[in-house]
Image (spheres, helix red, strand yellow):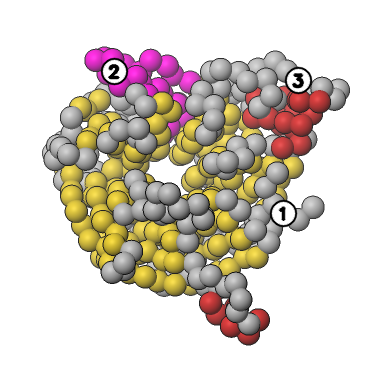
Amino acid sequence: MANVGETVAKYVGHKIAKIRWIPEVQGQLNPSKTFVTGGWDDQINKLSVWKVEDTSGVSTAAHTVTNEPKLLTEIDFAGDVTDIECIDSERILVSSSMGSLFLFNFNANHQVIRPQMEWRTIHCIRGHSCSCTCLATNSSSSEIVSGGEDGQINVLKLDHRHPVRTIESADSTTINDITFTKSNEVAAATFGGQVKVWDLRQPSDKPGQIMLLSGDRVSLLCVDKHPTQPHLLAAGGQDVWEVRFHPLSPDNLFTCSEDGSLWHWDGASVALQSVTGIPGTNKSFLPSSIGNGAGIGGGYDNLSPWLSVDATKHKMETFSLLPYNRLSINSLDILSRHLLSGSDCEAIFMIKDLVIR
């Protein structure tokens, strides 16, 4: 069963490192139509804001033209963009390979993006700046966390120009990705192949929990939190650049990889077996490995497809969303039934009207 609607490719002339939907203004019920991209591998990269044109009511001849995203504004960016998080419809956080973190303000009315604040060189090794590889925002407070090649985690606040806390010995390897699992708890994926969890209320720099996959150790490059079960994390290793739960239908998972693949992992059928009790459903907890991704749980919801042994027996449906692409897909984001991805082939791919069960 094909689960892909329409795929739109927009060639932008530079490699895309990160892509994120920009939230709608609070109170708006319609899905967002704007998104932001960040480039990499140029001397001067670009931070760009795009808009998806509304094609309702247009002729078929015009449809193929207006369907492409339209560039609203862009700004030069020193270094590679390593991560992007949108706090709201106006404030955009961007991390840099130069070791700094930036807050930009996007004015939709005037279609302009401007730098608002900078946390300069918050990641360094022996006095030299190193990449700020990842960041995460806290939806319930003004706290921000960043991770870097120096193995440190910084805790920042929007009203402070310097980190309010630094976990200096977070890891001896690179912190590749980080996310808030709760308002006071963060989980980080490390180059050493571990997922570490810290309670930021505790003064100790030691993680409260360390998780490691059984079998051969692989570097973990990304991590995402289940939207309704914060004890459940998905981590991608080896060549999986990003992993994302669907924000409203978390039985659906999406991954993008260095080999150019973009996958939709549909766990809805496995979840249905767990609910109905059809033979073959396992209701005990087993950390499941899905391709190069891993489900790691602490609360062990028996009905979650990501904790079911059936997922490891190839009973989960998977769909290749860009079957003919061969260059790296570096980033993805999913909103409603529309998925964005950015690639090394200097293109944005927007897949509309996905079948989400």
* Residue drawn at the location 59% of the way across and 23% of the way down: 215
Q: Is residue 116 magenta?
A: no
Task: Identify which amino acid the numbered label 1 is placed on.
Answer: Asn
Marking on residue 201: 2
Give the residue pinned by disc 3: 282
Quarter of the image holding residue 164? Answer: top left
**Within-10-Å neighbours for mark 1: few <14, some 14–19, many 20+:** some
**Within-10-Å neighbours for mark 3: few <14, some 14–19, many 20+:** many
Marking on residue 3: 1
Relative vertical location of residue 280 with respect to residue 235 in this rendering, above or below: above
**Within-10-Å neighbours for mark 2: few <14, some 14–19, many 20+:** few
Q: Nearer the viewer, residue 63 or 80?
A: 63
Q: Nearer the viewer, mark 3 or mark 1?
A: 1
Label total for image: 3
Q: Which residues are magenta?
A: 185-211
Question: Relative to residue 275, is residue 127 drawn left or right?
Answer: left
Tell me where residue 273 appears, x and y as whole percent.
79, 29
